[in-house]
Amino acid sequence: MKIDDDTAPRQCGEKVQDADALALTLLRTMGPLATKRVVPGPDGRPRKPPIDRAKWFVARQVRFQGVRNLYALLRRLDRDRRAFVVRARPLPGTDGRRVRRLLHRDGRTGEGPYLEAVPRAWAAFDFDDVPCPAATDPLDAIACGDWLRGTLPEPFHDAACVVQATSGCGLGDGLRYRLWFVLDRPLTGPALKAWCASPLLDPCTLDEAEPIYTARPVFEGVHDPVPVRFRLLEGLEDAVPDESARFHLPERTRTFGRRGAGDALPSLGFDGWLALVGDGEGRDLDEADLAAVRLAFRRSKVAREIWQGTRTYPDPRRRRFAFCAALARAGVQDADALAGAVLALEERTGCACPPPLAALAVAGALKAEAGA
């Protein structure tokens, strides 16, 4: 059996044009397990013995279409305890029946290489032993996945993803999850590392030949605390937007709060904006609430783009939800403040809707930040 070679390697950032960008390379062992074992330790607590390291594998590529198809594929791999994923693809002409996990020739044996690095339009991010947020159940995959998604660069925040509970999930206090995303453009592992660098992120799954284990652990004499290992976390987008390919530096190196062409509208001031929204009576938000709105607006590129009209949605309901979600992820927790922000946005875009009391104060806060 020969590995299919229907494409040539592409440059990082090129638009997805061939099937290899949306493909997983599966390596299947010839006997040893390709997942962790969990057994009782001498003190009765669960422990994970070292995994058996296989040397030779059967290799093939499995292609998919979109995040939901990826979710279905990963659920099937959940029970395949002798297979795992790598980012690299088999070299053209490689006999897939006998492959080592080598990107370069083995200097001792002369074998290989068998794999080559290629940009992929998917990414798997590992979070291991991340402190659990307050009032969050560490076994709630959706809540934890949503919080972890918010720690990645902003283009990931509104993208759907697959949340995988890794082998250590439920065996300690921290969060142990892996998030799988589909990207609009293929990126290499090093590009993803540079873009998404974070102290919370274990970058091992971005290495081209590193095993990404997909099968559930084997529990021997120990209760499995996570019976369902894969969940689909919905988002406004099915793939991380195109802008991902334009940023290969960590999020922290970008400058927020800069004025662009979208801010050129003349400022009406707080009183002028109140005149547009309503009569200004009944302001019920304190300065701390308004400060949170201003800070969130500065932090959130998505919120600013929606406000300025440079990020558009065909459905006004999606625009409202995206604006509210962007401010919430950026730190606005007060429900009245979020409601006011959404109504202020609707008034700015010309929708006829009576604002709640909080909208008047929020409108002024956003107006002052945006200068329009």
Image (spheres, rainbow, N blue to C red):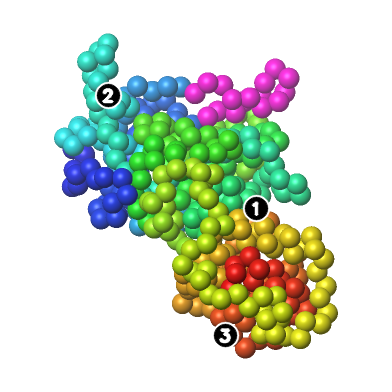
Q: How many marks?
A: 3
Residue under label 1: 143
Q: Residue at x 38, y 51 (%)?
A: 245
Return the mark for residue 350.
3
Q: Are marks 2 and 1 in contact (CB under 8 Å)?
A: no
Question: Looking at the image, is mark 3 or mark 1 earlier in the sequence?
Answer: 1
Frontmost of labels 3 and 1 is 3
Image-quadrant location for residue 39: top right
What amino acid is labelled 3 in the image?
A: Gly
Nearest to the observer: residue 81 or residue 193: 193
Residue under label 2: 104
What amino acid is labelled 2 in the image?
A: His
Question: Which range is magenta?
Answer: 36-51
Q: CA distance from mark 3 to mark 2?
A: 60 Å
At which x and y percent is residue 143? 65, 53
Q: Are marks 3 and 2 in contact (CB under 8 Å)?
A: no
Image-quadrant location for residue 32: top left
Q: CA distance from mark 2 to mark 1?
A: 41 Å
Image-quadrant location for residue 61: top left
At which x and y percent is residue 352? 62, 88
Q: Residue at x 60, y 69 (%)?
A: 371
Element under disc 1: helix
Above/below status of 103 relative to 110: below
